[in-house]
Image (spheres, grey):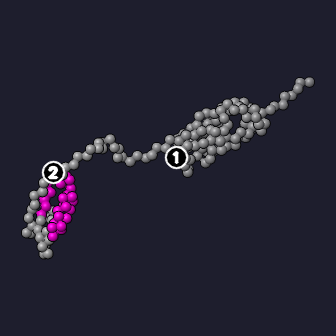
């Protein structure tokens, strides 16, 4: 009997909310003679006096915690890996292979637009490899732009300069 009473009292002490300063507890015996504690009065129940000295102050300053949900910010980088900056390409057909790298992850729906000499080269595509054909002799600039699913440019590579060298036949004067 004492163990049951101690258990019930233990449950009441720890079940009462910390901020319940004015909580009322009622006690009575049921048909089997067991003490019953409740926060709801019953005819014949006696109100108990409960001291509310269980106020616990946190030792951790939680005011600095930001509990607002924030969308992760993906900061993308675009790098042209081929051709190297200031490279000379020797190809009589004017062909140049351009490759790039996206970081951290190339998401589905994103596209890459190659910019050659300030103008878009063909349509944006879903990979970072381009084959340029019939590029004229001389100096050229390349950039890549990463475009999201809304068509917005979200990252741009640094400009890479390359030089196309194509052999030319000079006509001899007679």
Q: Is residue 136 above or below residue 5?
A: above
The residue at the point 72 percent across, 32 percent down is 88
Look at the image and tell me whether residue 140 can be seen. no
Instruction: Name the residue tied to disc 1.
Output: 150
Q: In this view, does 170 lie above or below 94?
A: above
The residue at the point 88 percent across, 26 percent down is 172
Residue, far top: 174
Is 164 situated left or right of 49 in this image? right
Could you say which quadrant of the image residue 22 lies in?
bottom left
Instruction: Name the residue tied to disc 2.
Output: 53
Is 41 situated left or right of 130 in this image? left
Q: Which of marks 2 and 1 is in front?
A: 2
Residue 56 falls inside the magenta stretch? no
Look at the image and tell me whether residue 87 can be seen. yes
Q: Which of 162 and 45 is in front in this view?
A: 45
Position of the N terminus, as image quadrant, is: bottom left
* Marks 2/1: CA–CA distance: 59 Å
Q: Is residue 3 above or below residue 52?
A: below
Percent position of residue 126, x then y: 61, 48
Percent position of residue 73, x then y: 46, 43
Is 70 situated left or right of 37 in this image? right
The residue at the point 13 percent across, 59 percent down is 24
């Amino acid at each position: 009997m004492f163990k049951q009473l101690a258990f019930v009292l233990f449950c009441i002490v720890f079940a009462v909310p910390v901020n319940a300063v004015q909580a009322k507890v009622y006690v009575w015996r049921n048909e089997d003679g067991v003490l019953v504690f409740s926060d709801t009065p019953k005819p014949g129940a006696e109100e108990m006096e409960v001291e509310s000295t269980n106020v616990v102050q946190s030792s951790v300053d939680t005011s600095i915690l930001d509990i607002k949900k924030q969308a992760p910010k993906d900061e993308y980088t675009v790098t042209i890996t081929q051709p190297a900056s200031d490279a000379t390409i020797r190809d009589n057909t004017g062909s140049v292979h351009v490759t790039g790298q996206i970081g951290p992850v190339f998401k589905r729906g994103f596209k890459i637009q190659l910019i050659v000499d300030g103008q878009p080269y063909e349509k944006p595509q879903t990979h970072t490899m381009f084959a340029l054909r019939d590029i004229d002799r001389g100096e050229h600039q390349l950039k890549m732009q990463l475009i999201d699913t809304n068509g917005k440019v979200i990252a741009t590579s640094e400009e890479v300069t390359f030089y196309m060298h194509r052999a030319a036949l000079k006509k001899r004067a007679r």
